[in-house]
Amino acid sequence: MSKAAIAEMFARFQAANPNPETELEYASPYQLLVAVVLSAQATDKGVNIATRKLFAEAPTPEAMITLGEAGVTEHIKTIGLFRNKAKNVVALSYLLLERHGGEVPADRDALTALPGVGRKTANVVLNTIFRQPTMAVDTHIFRLANRTGLAAGKDVDAVEAALLRRVPKPYLLDAHHWLILHGRYVCTARKPACDRCLVRDLCNSRDKTDLPPPGSPDHV
DNA sequence: ATCCCGAGGG
DNA sequence: CCCTCTGGAT
């Protein structure tokens, strides 16, 4: 995708949705951090169902520790990977109190030092809470970036670097959420809805989306 | 490269 | 049935 096409793409995203936001439900930076940890390989919708009950009982790190791993497990059993996640959420809450006075640190290294928090989760927190121009590359963005030609890369780190290079500065703060939402509702993994895609004419895969090359489950 | 791991969609 | 969902730790 050309530089001009990329600028046009984000101009359209911005016009259609001037203030994109996460669909995860949270009432504090701490709750956003927990929600993002829980969202690994799970849908936002499923995470919200679980966190409504979880945060009602444990809205703070202190309360989460009191609730304990078994208690957390009860609330998040409907989400995949729940054993690892329950353990991480409680351990992470301890460490937030020990190291950061119970606050979420605005620092990537401090965030990734927490259990269950990797680069992608840290980037979401830095962008969503602290409004830093990070690019969290999740399953949606990785797929969309490669498919459309916005930013090609063999792994998520390569795509992140390419996006930081190619997305025009003025759009960088909101690009993450535009791309997530577009990937979730339009440029989907299995059957992309190109017929209602805002940027169809700019996409490298236009007119090929219904003819996946043999041997490529996710076509180009 | 593998494991973790339930719900929803096709 | 198989694939996908805002991944991380080993």
Image (cartoon, coloured by chain):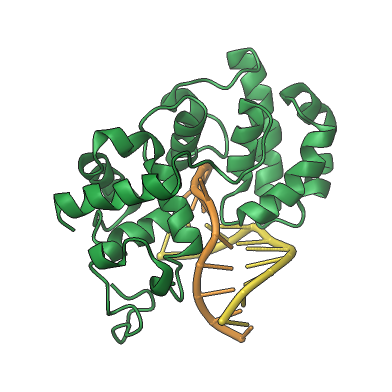
Chain colours: A green, B yellow, C orange
Q: A92 or A151: nearer the eye?
A: A151
| Position of residue A92 in the picture relative to residue A8 (left or right) | right
| Residue in view at x 52 percent, y 20 percent | A105
Q: Residue at x 66, y 27 (%)?
A: A28
Q: Is residue A113 visible from the viewing direction of this image?
A: no
Looking at the image, which is closer to me, A126 or A67?
A: A126
In this rendered view, identify the residue nearer to me: A69 or A197. Answer: A197
Is B4 above or below relative to B9?
A: above
Residue A152 falls in image quadrant: bottom left
The quadrant of the picture occupied by the C terminus of chain A is bottom left
Question: What is the x, y in percent for residue A53?
Answer: 82, 43
Looking at this rendering, what residue extends furthest in the top direction? A101
Q: Is residue A11 above or below residue A185?
A: above
| Residue at the image position 42 percent from the left and 50 percent from the top | A16
The image quadrant of residue A26 is: top right
Q: In the rendered view, does A87 fall on the left or right side of A113? A: right
Number of dots carrying numbers: 0
- Observer able to see residue A43: yes
**Spot occupied by residue A130 in the image (x, y as percentages of width and height):** 47, 24
State left or right for residue A156 relative to residue A151.
right
Residue A127 image point, x, y percent: 44, 32
Residue A177 placement (x, y as % from top left) = 45, 45
Q: Does C1 sit above or below residue A119?
A: below
Quadrant (top left/top right/bottom left/bottom right) for the N terminus of chain A: bottom left
